Image: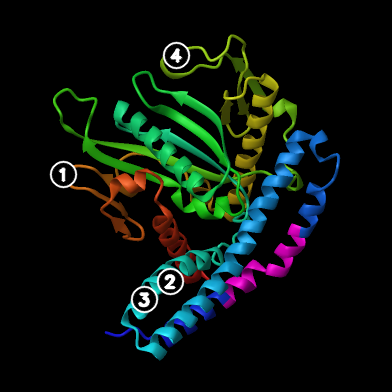
Amino acid sequence: MAVDFETEIKNLRATMASVREVTNLDRLQEQITELETQASAPDLWDDVERAQQVTSTLSRTKAEHDKVVGMDVRIDDLEALVELGVEEGDAATLEEAERDLATLRKDVAMLEVRTLLNGEYDEREAVVTIRAGAGGVDAADFAEMLMRMYLRWAERHGYPTTVLDTSYAEEAGLKSATFEVKAPYAFGTLGVEAGTHRLVRISPFDNQGRRQTSFAAVEVIPLIESTDSIEIPESDLKIDVFRSSGPGGQSVNTTDSAVRMTHIPTGTVVSMQNEKSQIQNRAAALRVLQSRLLLLKKAEEAAERKEMAGDVKASWGDQMRSYVLHPYQMVKDLRTNHEVGSTAAVLDGDIDDFIDAGIRWKRSLEKAED
């Protein structure tokens, strides 16, 4: 069946109109101008941390602006290509236009998903914690596989990440890990990844080669901002320091630089050990603790703690996604029914389609509740 290019292009333009409205290109341009002024200040690099923040924010803001503007240009180019193919009756040109259309549909759909991220904290950066669940050493290995998957996803998009804490399992893998994703809308985007993930495979740790099912839990919270005013009295904190350690219990350094911070009223515990300095680990732990308490506070107010904080058991009965490596290859999201057969690609960070389907699914539930 011949492609109705006129209708397809009209639909793409309509979608981009809503994307531009939500993105607010004028506001983005104002931010770019302001950041460029800050970046050109002669004393910018007197404060290295602030300079890095300004330059990285400027780069991301420009990329977001250019992505929207560039999509409009690509639609114009497609329209011109179609007109050329029709005028000259060139089948090869029209085939090229079909390929470009397919790519544009996918890229515009990804931009459209951003317009669905309108939650209170969706535009925040994210803190992701992964914990091994049921399944022994396979679960610990799976937790490390998931951490790599998310870090690779962030790398593909050019999103900076900072690993805050890694607790290694004795034989292989991770008991838990926490890292930041420093990009606008990281929380809104990755929030749908919160839940229990399930792995089915032939265990590389079983000398009899048996199939093993294991679980890992993913928690995603928004990063605290100074304007959130989450004050924690010192009397509410219990702070322990200990020596950082790496895989197999090998010492990372010889000082007690790692920090474990417990919020006594709620029992919330945060550990940080990836910085060399105890002061840096303490600051990172406090930041993550504040983020968790902020989310907990909002969840209590709305009576939706489980939904907002991703309170999951990481065991049978509550998994949201399955990664099956044996006896067949498939990754399937049990909420959206989105599935793919390329497990290697997914575990290498190719999860955009799962995230997009999850955001649309979540938004549909919210609309149904309104």
Kindly state the secondary structure of the residue where label 3 is placed: helix
Q: Nearer the viewer, residue 61 or 279?
A: 61
Q: CA distance from mark 1 to mark 2?
A: 34 Å
Q: CA distance from mark 4 to mark 3?
A: 56 Å
Q: Is residue 359 left or right of residue 50?
A: left
Residue at the spot of label 2: 105
x and y, in percent, of residue 218 in the image:
44, 42
Q: Is residue 215 visible?
A: yes
Residue at the spot of label 4: 249
Instruction: Give the amino acid at mark 3.
Output: Glu
What number is the disc on residue 98?
A: 3
Mark 1 and mark 2 residues within 8 Å of each other at the beta carbon: no
What residue span does the magenta drawing correspond to?
17-32
Instruction: Give the class, few, some or many, for how many residues have Cα within 10 Å of label 1's Cα (few <14, many ≥20).
Output: few
Q: CA distance from mark 1 to mark 3?
A: 37 Å
Which residue lies most toward the front here? 88
